Image: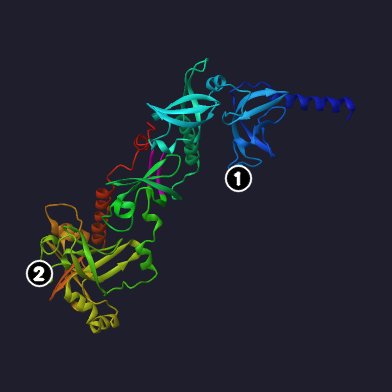
Amino acid sequence: MSQDSKNSDFGAIFAAYEAKVRTQFQIGDRLRGTVTHIDRNSIFVDVGSRSDAILDRTELQDAEGKVPVKVGDALEAFCIGTSDDTIRLTTRMNGSVADASLLEAYEAGIPVEGRVGLERKGGYEVEVAGQKGFCPYSQMDLFRREPATYIGEKFTFLITEYDSDGGNLVLSRRRCLEKEQEAQRQKLRETLVEGALVEGTVTRLMPFGAFVDLGAGVEGLVHVSELGWGRGLKPEEVLTAGQKVTVSVQKLDWENNRLSLSLRQTQESPWSRLEGGSDYVVGRRCEGIVTKLMPFGAFVELEPGLEGLVHISRLGAGRRIGHPSEVLQEGQTVEVTIVSIEPERQRLSLSMEDRRAAAVDDEPEAAAAASAEGQPAIRAGARLTGTVESHRDFGVFVTLAEGQTGLLHISQVEVERTGNPGKALYRRFPPNSSLEVVVLSVEGRRISLTLPETLEREAERQQVSDVTDQGGASLGNLGDVFGGLRLE
């Protein structure tokens, strides 16, 4: 390659570089660049000009002389002047800045540093670059604090009003805080994901839950149903305002400014302990508290978050009852026997009939004999396979082990509604077909049956009802939340 060709290529490269270099800067321009070097006095920032811009190190360093940025970090600042192709930067104006006036700061929106002096009618006196200014109460913070909190302290302000003769200097710290919050909020929006565990501070307790500040004034709601695994928890029983907590992000709806959080998901589930083995075993007699009465049975809590169903057929102690409220009331302490455990489905079947407990605990011979013949014992809660024997309008008779017969009542079955229920049952359960059933009760020779899916539907309907009862309240609106912080 000839020398002329090389010079031509170099010229093209230099021209392309020059085209990208910014040469015009105005006082007040907001510049974003990359830190290239930090020395004892200055921080050098590449802002796309021929030479690096310079920021006074003292603007960022703390009491120990450390700065919160390093080489390679992005930095945003304001242009406060140029000299000899050197651009001077500031993140705020203070008394040491000689080449930028308060008027320039006002017109360009450059933050200024001021010290709060005396409290006076309507606000505070603030000294900025040797001049006296005024900051109204409403513009000192995002929310009101005691005046002593501010007196004598240095803060960053924006100038909202300024006369050229310096006779009227009005300041706002709140606007600076709002800008900082908006930047932090945007960062949260970019980094926060559903399922993440984050730290926050409890700000408010309400009857429907607790608000938690995740930073930058962004608050989410821990609904009462997510306070823990126990039922009926109240926010004041679990949390206090100002408490630091770790929460799980359940749902992020930035479009509607709704953040749903959970404390419960940060705690071990009692059901997970059952999967690994525990003291809760089939046949054990336990003490629990009645938490809810439903037409089909009673829910009993053995420990917070571990709740089982006593079907209505297992409440009567040998007699029929129309509703659990005939024998129980919510909040009552009762003894129950564990009939079956399904931790993977979070299902626990219980019984309150003592004779069933005896059948489980005191008659192992009967169970052993049935097991030896390859059949489970016919007792409440047992899951059996039988054969459809005959049909009636009121139900289906099913042949079980040793020639015993049980009744699957039509109330335990979902069938099409027709004028002939017996025919509908016949179509659903053909004669001599195999059928899996669950024993509801055994009263002498009378055996009442149900279907496994019937019990599952009842439990699922209860769970849906619980969610509707406990989760019907709003998850919280950031607009409502910020209203309390004067961010409206």
Q: Amino acid at mark 1?
A: Glu
The residue that appears at 64% across and 36% down in the rendered structure is 57
Q: Residue lying furthest top in this view? A: 165
Q: Nearer the viewer, residue 433 or 5?
A: 5
Identify the mark at residue 319; answer none if there is no mark.
Answer: 2
Give the extent of the magenta segment.
Answer: 249-260
Between the residue at mark 1 and the residue at mark 2, the CA separation in whole angstroms equals 80 Å
Q: Position of residue 370 (x, y in %)?
A: 26, 80
Q: Nearer the viewer, residue 405 or 91?
A: 91
The residue that appears at 11% across and 72% down in the rendered structure is 318
Say above or below: 273 vs 223: below
Q: Residues within 10 Å of mark 2 (few under 14, many from 20)?
A: few
| Residue 253, magenta (yes or no) | yes
* SS at circle 1: loop
Q: Going by the image, does 114 lie left or right of 405?
A: right
Say above or below: 367 vs 117: below
